[in-house]
């Protein structure tokens, strides 16, 4: 089992920045991919960014490219999401997720491990 604990959300004005963290524990050696998803009220959970731990590739949904950066600290088994130039439409509950299969996927059904959500609210 892998346990994920997310943190770092908050309230920020448009144009501001936040950094989310997600610490993994348990069978971390089995992790191949960690990703961030988000879910706004009344909307489906959507992929934001993914990091393949095996080949160091990263992926982003188009709406956050150039503004968000996913990174990790291997020693801490922690993945981060640096969010810059935030917009009101980035407001959502952000979740980290992990999977053991060596490919980043945008499908929520392909991630067996999830952290609790952390709220990000961007005011205009």
Image: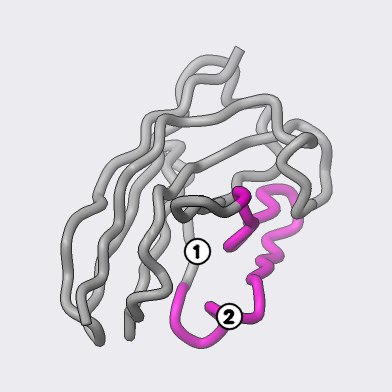
Look at the numbered disc 2 and give the secondary structure of its residue: helix
How far across and down, in percent of the image, does residue 97 sit? 58, 38
Considering every residue shown, the one lying at the far front of the view is 42
Q: How many discs appear?
A: 2
Mark sitting on residue 63: 2
Displayed quadrant of residue 10: bottom left
Judging from the image, the colouring scheme is one colour
How far across and down, in percent of the image, does residue 31 sit? 66, 33
Mark sitting on residue 70: 1
Q: Quadrant of the N terminus?
A: top right
What range of the chain is rendered magenta? 44-68
Judge from the rendering whether residue 68 lies leftward or rightward of residue 50; answer left or right: left
How far across and down, in percent of the image, does residue 64 sit? 53, 78
Distance, label 2 to label 1, CA atoms, is: 14 Å
Judge from the rendering whether residue 4 lies leftward or rightward of residue 85; answer left or right: right
Does 87 appear above or below 105?
below
How far across and down, in percent of the image, does residue 35 sit? 60, 49
Does 64 appear above or below 46?
below
């Amino acid at each position: 089992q892998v346990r994920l604990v997310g943190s770092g959300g908050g309230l920020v004005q448009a144009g501001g920045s936040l950094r989310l963290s997600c610490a993994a524990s348990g069978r971390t050696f089995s992790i191949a991919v960690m990703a961030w998803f988000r879910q706004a009220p009344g909307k489906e959970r959507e992929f934001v960014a993914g990091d393949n731990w095996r080949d160091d590739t990263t992926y982003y949904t188009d709406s956050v490219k150039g503004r968000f950066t996913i990174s990790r600290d291997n020693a801490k088994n922690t993945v981060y999401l640096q969010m810059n130039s935030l917009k009101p439409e980035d407001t959502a509950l952000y979740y980290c997720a992990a999977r053991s299969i060596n490919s980043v996927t945008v499908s929520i059904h392909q991630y067996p491990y999830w952290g609790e959500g952390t709220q990000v609210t961007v005011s205009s």
